[in-house]
Image (cartoon, helix red, strand yellow):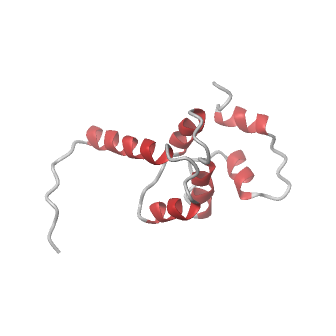
Amino acid sequence: MAELDAPDLDKDKMYELLEATFAGLLAIPRMPENVAREMYKLGIRVPYKDIVAAARLGVEGVETWIIVKSFLGLADDIPHLIKNLYNGSAGNTATWDDIRQSTCLAGG
């Protein structure tokens, strides 16, 4: 298999490209869970902070990314309260006000 001749990118440029990729993926409303799961399996890791930013912009269905991250055991960057909500943990008494406060979705 021939190697691809990729231009040398500095670290900052690579992060800019990754951020643009995440923003593009998160702009897709109601991403099908199976598609998000396959992207994670391919190594695409969407940070929680970017999921929250998409939610603030009103993108519908970004919770799919939280569900998939949790299911695959990649939810280290997701607050405990949010993981409990999306995992359907027994005895979860979190309210949407609790969630807004813990994720700063209330505009903070």
Q: Residue furthest front?
A: 29
Residue 103: image quadrant is top right
User: Left or right: 76 with respect to 24?
Assistant: right
Residue 57: image quadrant is top right
Q: Residue at x 57, y 40 (%)?
A: 59
Task: Return the x and y of residue 53 as percentages of the image width and height.
Answer: 54, 36
Task: Return the x and y of residue 99 as percentages of the image width and height.
Answer: 73, 39
Total marks in image: 0
Q: Residue at x 50, y 47 (%)?
A: 28
Q: Residue furthest top?
A: 108
Task: Return the x and y of residue 43 as percentages of the image width and height.
Answer: 41, 61
User: Left or right: 32 with respect to 12?
Assistant: right
Relative to residue 96, is residue 33 depicted above or below? below
Q: Residue at x 57, y 57 (%)?
A: 69
Q: Residue at x 16, y 66 (%)?
A: 3
Relative to residue 41, is residue 64 depicted above or below? above
Residue 104: image quadrant is top right
Nearest the eye: 85 or 29: 29
Relative to residue 94, is residue 74 depicted above or below? below
**Quadrant housing the C terminus:** top right
Task: Return the x and y of residue 98 as percentages of the image width and height.
Answer: 77, 36
Nearest the eye: 108 or 32: 32
Q: Residue furthest bottom?
A: 1
**Quadrant housing the N terminus:** bottom left
